[in-house]
Image (tube, rainbow, N blue to C red):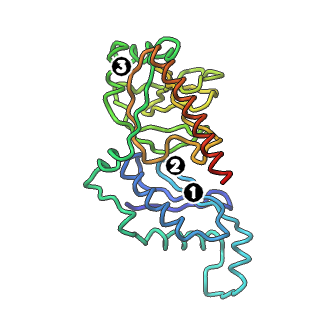
Amino acid sequence: MSYELYPLGEQAVVIRWGDRISEQTQRHIDRSLKSLERHWFPELTELVAAYRTVTVYYDPVALYLKSTRGYDPNEINLPYELICSWIHSCLREQRPEDVIEDSQDGKAAESANVKVVPVCFGGAYGPDLGEVALHSGLSSEEVVELYCSVSYFVHMVGFVPGFPYLGGLPERLQIPRRSFPREEVPIGSIGIAGGQTGIYPLASPGGWQLIGRTPVTLFDAALSQPALFKAGDYVRFEQISEAEFTVVSSKAKAEAGLKRKMEGLCGDN
């Protein structure tokens, strides 16, 4: 897949692939990140992946000073050009372990990385379910059935810590954001905006259409791996009742406490 490079201010270069969001693009991003990380050097500061891009942040002053120590007027010495040259070199490299054949269409990855998320739909847990049903021409029950019938792909995690941006929403369920965002969306809320769906890991402002809520903990800063999801994972949703929500919530809190305790004990050793 071809890509383009362009500057983002004076301290970053953006690598952009293709013209649409897809799982194939995500696989290119994943393997490119592996190559860039293998060739990391001190003047780099961060790599940030998104739907179709990876942004490479660097220290231009440090890079310029390093490049002029053995100054050769015939060589590239401008920080931006040095970074672009380095990116081209990294992306030309492909190792067999980095490559997922497109013909597999991610099926092996899906079976290995799928996470099932229990959700209580409608009512106080999903106040916008009726609006989504009206927009789609379906009943609320049909919306839930359709929503739970497919697997979703985690394109990236962001907005707030642990928020998964999920692709694969059935076209019939696609609906614009709310005209006026809520000042606070409850933790665990499941939302729809356009062709995306996602889960709020923390209570925060938000304008997505809320159709349900999960009792699962998506983000815990006390853990060594604080976010439940990462780019490349797959998600399936499973409907539960309000009574089951309470039971699963209590179990999730107990498991989270045990994980924190175990990691604390491991840290002491």
Mark 2 vs 1: CB contact within 8 A = yes
Is 145 on the left or on the right of 251, as rendered? left
User: What is the crowding at mark 3: few (fewer than 14 residues within 10 Å), some, or many (at least 20)?
Assistant: many
Residue at x 48% of width, y 11% of height: 123
Residue 252 image point, x, y percent: 53, 29
Q: Amino acid at mark 2?
A: Ala
Q: Nearer the viewer, mark 1 or mark 3?
A: 3
Query: Residue 50 has which mark?
Result: 2
Q: Amino acid at mark 3?
A: Val
Label 1 vs 3, first from the N-terminus: 1
Residue at x 56% of width, y 58% of height: 14
Residue 80 image point, x, y percent: 62, 68
Query: Residue 79 has which mark?
Result: none
Q: Amino acid at mark 1?
A: Thr
Residue 99 image point, x, y percent: 36, 62
Disc 3: which residue? 143
Label 3 vs 2, first from the N-terminus: 2
Structural distance between the alpha carbons of marks 1 and 3: 37 Å
Residue at x 36% of width, y 26% of height: 147
Mark 3 vs 2: CB contact within 8 A = no
Disc 1: which residue? 55
